[in-house]
Image: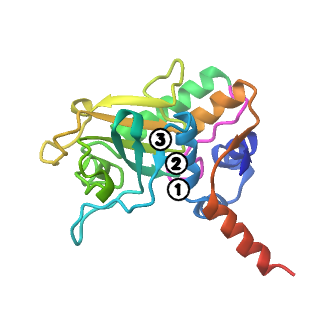
Amino acid sequence: MKLNIKELLDFFDDKTNSKKGDATAVMAMLGEELNGGIYKDFRNNEVEILEESITQGFKGGNYLDSWMIDKDNDTLLQCEIKNWGARALGGKSLKLDSTDVEVKKIVEYYWNHQINKKDLSVNVKHPSSVSKVLLEMKPPKLYRNISNIEPLVIYWMPISSDSVEFNPLSIVSIKSLNLPTDFYIDKRFSKLYIFSVSLYLRQLYKKGQEFIDLNMPNLERRIKILNEFQL
């Protein structure tokens, strides 16, 4: 399915292009396959999104959104996807034609707000809806023998540790995070990968790319259902 990059960014990054509740409803229909698919495009389709559920393997345990497999590097990615845009709590608008100074201001705001003060800080109870990505999850049966597992958070919002080049992928030392000392983290993890869908799409658009082609069978099925509702 080909999606218009400008329309995606205008809708999810700019509050003036939607009414309250619109972004949540539309993102619910798009599901995690939008943001997961865009990360896959960022990786040149060298990762595969798995269908298996991702849980800790015991009743009452935490769960994440998706497993991805990088077969070339024999690596599993355990992913938490957050679809938060401009209309989310604490969200800020960022127009597509914003200057680098304006983008820098918003990127720094989100990094400080989400990483330093909220999702990955001592200010919230852990595991939070984001820090749970650092917990040990039970790998899919087919990949139980893979020892290299990496945590990945995919945000929609324009967030990055790089406020100069606005790199959509940030790699952060877990030791540098302001997490409580008693929060148990899977000992295999030393780095956390944080990806911004918005910043990646902005890069593509700046290079002249107007559309992004994604495999979205769930969205296609939902659109078909909606079409059947009409006269």
Instruction: Look at 67% across and 69% down and name the residue there.
Output: 222
Q: Is residue 95 magenta?
A: yes
Range of magenta residues = 84-98
The answer for how far apart the CA atoms under marks 1 and 3 are is 16 Å
Q: Is residue 170 magenta?
A: no
Q: Which residue is mark 3?
A: 47
Which residue type does callout 1 highlight?
Answer: Glu
Q: Which residue is mark 2?
A: 36
Check disc 2 and report its element: helix, strand or loop: helix
Looking at the rendered image, the disc whose residue lies closer to the viewer, 1 or 3, is 3
Q: Are marks 1 and 3 in contact (CB under 8 Å)?
A: no
Instruction: Look at 63% across and 52% down and name the residue there.
Output: 215
Q: Is residue 4 left or right of residue 35?
A: right
Tell which of 115 and 130 is nearer to you.
130
Q: Is residue 121 left or right of residue 34?
A: left
Check disc 1 and report its element: helix, strand or loop: helix
For disc 2, the neighbor class at 10 Å (few under 14, some 14 to 19, many from 20) is many
Whether 64 is drawn above or below 134: the answer is below
Whether 166 is drawn above or below 41: the answer is above
Tell which of 145 and 32 is nearer to you.
145
Q: Are marks 1 and 2 in contact (CB under 8 Å)?
A: yes
Q: Quadrant of residue 24?
A: bottom right
Which residue type does callout 3 highlight?
Answer: Val
Q: Which residue is mark 1?
A: 32
Whether 135 is drawn above or below 191: the answer is below
Q: Main secondary structure of the magenta part?
A: loop
